[in-house]
Structure formats: C-alpha cells, structure tokens
Image (cartoon, rainbow, N blue to C red):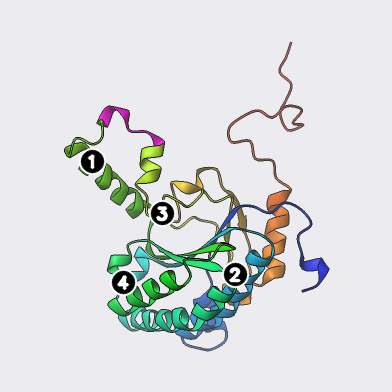
Amino acid sequence: MGQELTPDFPVPQHVGIIMDGNGRWARRSGLMRLRGHEAGVEAVRDTVEACAEWGIPHLTLYAFSVENWQRPQAEVDGLMKFLVRFLHHEKADLVKNRIHLKGLGRLRDLPTAVTEALQEVEQATRGGDRMTLRLALSYGGRQELMDAFCRLAAKVRQGQLNPNSVSMEDIHAALYDSSMPDPDLIIRTAGEVRLSNFLLWQASYAEFHFTDVLWPEFRRQHLLHALKDYHARVRRFGKVIEQDPAVEDCRP
C-alpha cells in the first residue's frame, strides 16, 4: 500500500457503511443482481483490510435490512446461500488479522444455515483485538428501537425498572449490541442520500459522506477520501466551540 493511501490524521473510532449499488452495477454489466452482490465482496475485503490497517477499531457494514426480505424470493435465497459461503471463506483471514466479527440485527429471522455459520465465525474470532467488524443482517433501526423498548417494558413489568426514570443509558443497554460505540462517520455509496433505517438511535451525531461510486467499485482510495472529508469537519454536538469562525459573535 502506498504512502499516499495512508491517512496522516486521526481516524474515527467507528465507521458505518451503507453498501449500495450492487444491483445497479450488475444491471450495467448485463448480469443478474446476485452477481453484483458477489462482486461487492472485493469491496468488503479491501475496506475491512484498510480499516484494520489504519487503526479504525469499529466497522459496521449494512449487509441486509429487514426491508430486504421483501425482495424476490429467488434473490433472497441466493443472498442467504452466498452469505454462508462468504462467512466460511473469510473466517481464516478474520482470525489471522485479529478481527472479531459480530452479527447485528434480528438474527433469529435468518435461515438456520446462516445463523450457524455466523455463530461459528463469531466464536472463532472472539479473540480478535484489532478491530470489531459488525454485519448488520436482518437489521432495521426502527425495529431495533421497538425490540429495545419491549425489553425495557419487560423490566418494568418485572419491577426491575422504574418507568419514570428510564435513561438514555437504559435504552442504549437494551439495543442489539450495547458494547457498540456510536458511529462517528456513516458512508453511503451509489449516490443515495438517505439513512434507510440504519442505526437511527446511534447515528444522532454521526457525520455523513455520500459518494456516487457503486459499492462493487468502492476501494480504499474512496474510503480515504471519506475520512479526509470527515477530518475536515468540526463536530459541535450541539455546543458552541470557542473561536469557531462559523459562529457569529452576538455580543453587544
């Protein structure tokens, strides 16, 4: 990897990516949609490797949403079979590179073959201390909040939680993965500029970067461009930063 493709500035702690454009890439290439998903694997590998090399400790990839179950059955079945192959094939490299893989979402809705493969890789990579890679599978931000509120309601019924004192920390603890930090940067490919039900609670103060690049063509140079864009921004979190030129001096 050339020095020009190495960030020379502090990197974010958590990057989330909405991987979009597989279908359009396949259509443009005259191929079936599933071929686009297969082509996207190289983008996944390059992105995961780059994040690990550059010291980004958390990466979350939006791989399959709850809405994706509404796609044609043949495509869904093909995606599930492809996911099983992907998990088995990548396990050794994840272990070698000390990357801990975790599933995120309504994993109970996945086919048995997928959940078994996912659990196998999760267990094999538990010792990964270099980076945590989360695959959002059967995931939806609204559904995550619904499930979290149901967990909190159960605690209220059991007398374990006072409904008048529910805190943001309580809600965070009830999410799918309470150990996951909020994303600093969310990237979306293929020219779309919406969140599509991804990490709605966690993304409250995330920065966003949108690119026209289709996911199968996304490589580390595009990731580096997104990181540079992120690094150039000022994150205020609703506060006023002293000597910020963007804040007008309103003193008399």
Regarding residue 189, the answer to whether it shows in the image is: yes
Residue lying furthest right in this view?
Answer: 3
Residue matched to label 4: 110
Q: Are marks 3 and 2 in contact (CB under 8 Å)?
A: no
Asked which secondary structure carries label 2, the reply is helix
- Read off the magenta span: 163-168
Q: In this view, does 6 lie above or below 11?
A: below
Residue lying furthest front in this view?
Answer: 127
Q: Is residue 95 above or below residue 103?
A: below
Give the mark, 3 or 2, whose residue is nearer the N terminus: 2
| Residue 65 vs residue 164, the one in the foreground | 164
| Residue plotted at (38% across, 58% down) | 140
Residue lying furthest left in this view?
Answer: 157
Residue matched to label 2: 48
Three-letter code, disc 3: Asp
Give the mark, 4 or 1, whose residue is nearer the N terminus: 4
Q: Are marks 3 and 4 in contact (CB under 8 Å)?
A: no
